[in-house]
Amino acid sequence: MTLEIAIGPPRLAINEGLGFLVTDQDGQITWPTHQGLYASDTRVVSSWQIYANGEPWDLLNSGNIAHFAAKIYLVNRLFETETGPVEGGNLGLLIGRALGHGGLHEDFDLVNHGSEAVEFNLEVGIRCDFADLFEVEADSVVRRGRITTKWTPASARLRTSYVNRDFRRAITITVDRTPTKPVYANGRISFDIRLDPGASWHACLLYDFEQGQKTSRASRVCVDDCLSSKAAKRVSAWRSMVCKLSTSNGEFQQLYNQAIEDMAALRLPIEGTDQLEYVPAAGLPWFIGLFGRDSLIVSLQNSLIYPDFARGALDVLARFQATSHDDYRDAEPGKIMHELRTGELAHFNLIPHTPYYGTADATPLYLVALHNAWRCTGDASLIERHIDTAEKCLDWIDRYGDRDGDGFQEYETRSNAGYENQSWKDADDAVVYPDGTPVKGPKALCELQGYVYDAWQRMAEIYDARGDGDRAGQLRAKAKTLFERFNDVFWDQASGFYAFALDGNKKPVLSVASNPGHCLWSGIVAPERAASVVKRLMMPDMWSGWGIRTLSADHRAYNPHSYQRGSVWPHDNGLIALGFRRYGFFKEAACIAGDVSGAASYFMQHRMPELYAGSTRTPTTFPVQYKRANVPQAWAAGSCFSFLQAIVGMRADAPNGKLYIDPRLPDWMPEMTLRDLRLGENLLHLRFWRNGPATHWEVCGGDASLAESHNCATGPNLWDVGRGT
């Protein structure tokens, strides 16, 4: 008999827009912890407890009914009253919560299941610390301003405010729809309740958020009706618009369905974007905000699922493109931002995230995402709208990305509060020499060269389409030079692998890491070397059985439970699988897809976490989630879509009305159907099936002339976007 294992954090979490709530599974917020109700990078509620005559309640079960709503089922413990004891379990308490863009709606529903009337005091203890999210995460909360609380009995309203000079936050909690007059004392809202046998009692608590002079109000609709709310309708609209997958492989099917839900859950209410052209938050709880690199990679992941996805990210990131030098924020003209925060620390410039520009890869990835969106949608206006932004990105790559003029992209923070590492592996200890010591100072990571190579190639195609052949030729010449120099300098003949990075002295850092897999994705790997790179990444020290590790298990700095020194990141594996597929290594790409999606089946709701341990898979082990992983996380969820692209082998050419297909279904996915697959304004339904080792496909809905077979094994550049080196 096979036992189902459900791995995940022992918590309950809901989120919507820039707000989220993380509690214990019984709905309570324990202090001091990282739990709380957060709005715009500020923890507005830091402690929440509920009692019956001073006694806690016992949890039966709890769970999400939507990404923005949850229910908690509790029963009473034995407690004493003036008329005698109330036996444990006689009272049932259902707490419902729904979070909207405005605030939190909380319902209490009490039922007396006992045979006698009960009189008792129901108390809700609430405390607010208004701590900045950065300080909560760092376990270093500093009180700077003043907190005041006011209870208004006539309106049953509790307002708690925080003021530090011109920074203001407040939360107003209003008791609504209850026959019992509430009282506030000792930091608790309390109700004197009398319930006859079989009787019920209801109350609502409405949590309204205030930011400066703006008040955002919670929904007045009870949680039982939240599935018809605006938030629920937005999710429903998203589901109806995306590509639908059906397959007999239950693990992959559930992973795909959950990924669609997670993409809907992480949408941000950014001005100028609508419910479908949105920008995803990076992840819950620490990354509910606008991120450059994450948004662009997620846009690329979603190109098969909903190609218009990229519009929001391209628009919003263009607005924040740097226009001047700012060492504190690591900004230079033309650079695409890394992270935007709106809490107290950002308000007073105590952190540089206003926004912060400490990322070396978002700028070339912006160009990659722009080209990809154009190829998938066929919308030439995308190019015209963003060509000025793209020109500034190209200029930044030349003037600032290549810091010393050697032809390679390097990064080094100039900020006293900046990040030591500014690639996707951005932990301070992520980039290490073979002896385990961290690489400090300027460093040129291998994948950055690939991103720029890819960006130049793609922009050359865009300039060709705009009739600027001279500019296209210049970019292709630069890409050719970078290709040749990269393969000369970064290649280590002895190991048959590419260097992790060049250090500040231009010495290759020969630690074996997952980063060269991204070089396969971008196409900068010389074709004759691809097999060696694939083989090295699939060796036991890199391949855990649950995915490719970020760092070799043979490395002196390896730690399977670290953030980026031996853990497995799903999005990393998704890009590597695409790289394998690009160079014709179908079996290995399918192996990654199958084992990482298999790992997802062990996590609660088949929801892919940000990362998990790089421990070796055995018949008696299961994947172990990183202790502080973000769940859900956008690019972790999007890894499923990368795996799907690697399996199906699609290349969109919407400007010319073509979709090139080269499917290679693995034996663990013998059949698959895609519905509502978009190519420009067209919708296609496609069916795939295996017959022996061969994969067949047909168009079973839409214009069949749009789809055409294409053998990607004829060359890596043909597989992606049809460009030669």
Image (cartoon, rainbow, N blue to C red):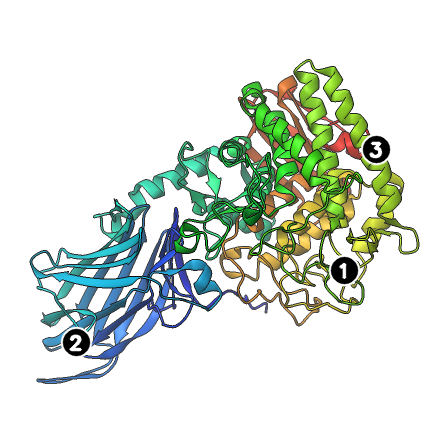
- Label 1, label 2: how many angstroms apart (C-alpha)? 60 Å
Q: Residues within 10 Å of mark 3 (few under 14, many from 20)?
A: some
Q: Residue 594, how many percent across, how many down?
A: 67, 52
Image quadrant of residue 61?
Answer: bottom left
Quadrant where the image shows the N terminus: bottom right
Q: Residues within 10 Å of mark 1 (few under 14, many from 20)?
A: many
- Label 2, label 3: how many angstroms apart (C-alpha)? 81 Å
| Residue at mark 1 | 542
Q: Residue 136, how many percent across, how many down?
A: 43, 64
Q: Residue at x 49, y 33 (%)?
A: 319
Q: Residue reaching furthest top?
A: 467
Q: Residue at x 23, y 74 (%)?
A: 51
| Residue at mark 2 | 114
Left or right relative to 83: residue 417: right
- Label 1, label 3: how many angstroms apart (C-alpha)? 31 Å
Type of residue at label 3?
Thr
Q: Nearer the viewer, residue 653 or 384?
A: 384
Q: Residue at x 74, y 49 (%)?
A: 445
Image quadrant of residue 695?
Answer: top right
Secondary structure beneath label 1: loop
Counting residues from the start of the chain, the first of labels 1 and 3 encountered is 3
Secondary structure beneath label 3: helix
Type of residue at label 2?
Gly
| Residue at mark 3 | 481
- Is residue 529 visible to the viewer in this orientation of the structure? yes
